[in-house]
Amino acid sequence: MYALLLLSLACMPEREQPFGAGGDRISPSSGSGDADTDADGDADTDTGDTDDSGGDADTDADADSDTDTDADSDIPGGDDCAIGLGQIACDLPATDQTGAPWTLWSTYGTPMVISVGHAYDSDLQQSSEWMAETTGARGAGAAVILVNGPLTTPASGVDATEWATTYGISPVLFGMSAADRSAWMIGEQTATYVLDKDLRITWIGYGYVGQEKLDDKLKAL
């Protein structure tokens, strides 16, 4: 009887494994799952705030393009200049509408508004309509730097003269270097900078800057 029982057990078919034979069980991940990740596996973070006037973007000092200079300067803090919030702005050489050389550092002692953009950009056109009036009322200077003229080619003295005549702004500048353009512009957007009398950058706006917004920034200086 015992021999019969052993023979019967030996002839029974082998029982299948429920997850497939030979497979290894994978333990669930112990991660918390709190961080969203993008396609390349990096954690996504919120990059910045936009204010409420026409797409102006307040930029954070960490996100600004910085350019340093090793040259000695007569501007306090100029040796450590950078194109970022709270920084002394690096010098910006160009040519004005009369053909005379101009530098940003030559304006030291006067608050300044600098708008850098293309002549065909409607944001720059609209801002230019009232920029001289608004800055003048606050005792500040205004300068427009044309990178490209109305035909998407590099701005010329003729373009600068026409802009100065049309909008009553002086100086209107051209001849910006590729390196300065890279530092002072984000893509193709017009960039507007408010600088105090020490040439420290106190605010940066991208795209259209409303008159009330700019006046508030100047009033706070």
Image (tube, rainbow, N blue to C red):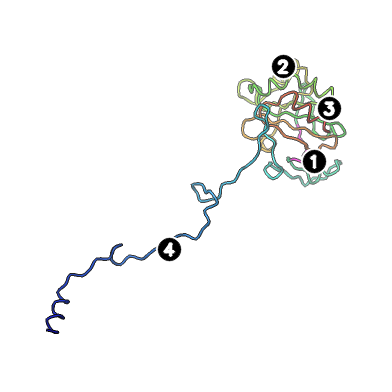
Q: Dot 4, how many residues are within 10 Å of its Cα: few (below 14), some (14-19), or many (20+)?
A: few
Rounded to the nearest angstrom, the CA distance separating label 3 from label 2 is 22 Å
Residue 202 position, x and y percent, is 78, 37
Rounded to the nearest angstrom, the CA distance separating label 4 from label 2 is 71 Å
- All told, the count of numbered labels is 4
| Lower position in the chain sequence, tag 2 or tag 1 | 1
Q: Which residue lies furthest to the top in this view?
A: 166
Helix, strand or loop status at disc 2:
helix
Instruction: Tell me: residue 181, above or below residue 151.
Output: below
With 78 as the anchor, is 121 left or right in this view? Answer: left
Q: Give the range drawn in magenta.
A: 85-93
Circle 1: residue type: Ile
Residue wearing tag 4: 27
Circle 3: residue type: Ala
Residue 14 position, x and y percent, is 21, 70
Circle 2: residue type: Glu
Q: What secondary structure prevails in the magenta region?
A: loop
Tell which of 158 and 60 is nearer to you.
Answer: 60
Helix, strand or loop status at disc 4:
loop
Helix, strand or loop status at disc 1:
loop
Residue wearing tag 2: 162
Helix, strand or loop status at disc 3:
loop
Residue occupying image coordinates x 85% and y 34%: 197
| Lower position in the chain sequence, tag 1 or tag 4 | 4
Between circles 2 and 1, the one closer to the viewer is 1
Rounded to the nearest angstrom, the CA distance separating label 1 from label 4 is 55 Å
Q: Do the residues under discs 1 and 4 have CB atoms within 8 angstroms?
A: no
